[in-house]
Image (cartoon, rainbow, N blue to C red):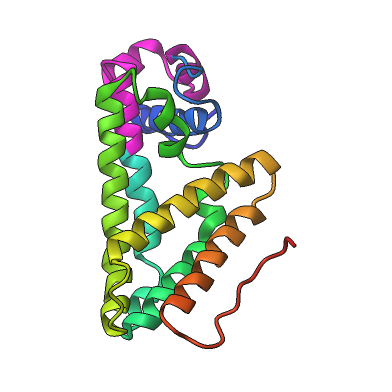
Amino acid sequence: MVKHKTNTKEKVIIATQELMTSRGYSATTVDEIIKYAGVSKGGFYHAFKSKEELTIVALEDYEEKGWEIVANGAYAEIEDPVERALAFVQFLEEKSGELWAHGCLLGSISIEVANSHPSVINRIDELFDDFEKGIEVILAPALETKKITEVSGKDLSIHLLAVIEGSIITAKSHRNPRFLQDGIARFRHYLGLLLKLDGVEKKSTHQ
C-alpha cells in the first residue's frame, strides 16, 4: 500500500507505477490499484476517467521524475564535451539502482500494449523519443569535438537506451542489479574507445 501520501491522485499514480512495473498492464486491474493506493473507488474515478488515461499520466510522471534525477547530475557542470559525455554515462551507471532497481515502467508495458492500446503506446514512443533526444544533446558534442562521423549522436542515444532496457531485463531475470550496472559500464567503455581515449576501463563483476 502507498503510504505517507495525502493526495489521492498522487497515491493512485504511484500505485500504478509500482504495480505495472512489476506486473504489467493487463495484470494490473483498477480494483488492485485502488486497494494498493488506499483510496476509494469514487476518489479514483474523480481523478481519472479510465485506466488508459491513468496509465498515460503515470508514464509522464515516471519519465519526468526520472529525467529530473538525470538532469541534476554533477556531470552537467563539466565544460569539456568529451569528459561530460563519459561522466554522464558513469552517472547513469552509479544511479541505475535508484532509477531502474525495479525495472522500467515504459519498457515493462510497451510490448504488451503495442497492438491493443494505441493511445498508450503512442505516448510511450514519444517519451522514449524525448529520452533519446535528451541523451543525444549530451553525447553529440563529444563526437563533434573529436570529429567522429561514423556514428551520430542519435545513433549513440538509441544504442544507450537499448543497452539500458536490455540490461534491465537481464538484471530482473537474474535477480541481480549488477547486470544493469555492468551493461552501462560496457557502453561507457565502448564510448571511450570510440572517442579514442586511453585508460577507459570496463568494469564488470561477471566473467
Residue 133 horizontal/vertical position (percent): 26, 57
Circle count: 0
Query: 145 and 181: which one is in front?
Result: 145
- Residue 165 painted magenta: no
* Segment tinted magenta in the rendering: 30-59
Q: Nearer the viewer, residue 136 or 95?
A: 136
| Residue 167 drawn above or below residue 80 | above
Which residue sits at x=28%, y=74%? 149
Quadrant in which the N terminus appears? top right
Asked whether, in this view, residue 165 is left or right of residue 48, the answer is right
| Horizontal side, residue 75 vs residue 1: left or right | left
Q: Nearer the viewer, residue 178 or 72?
A: 178
Q: Main secondary structure of the magenta part?
A: helix
- Residue 34 location, quadrant: top left
Residue at image coords 62%, 41%: 172
Residue 76 relative to residue 194: left or right: left
- Most extreme residue toward the bottom, as rendered? 198
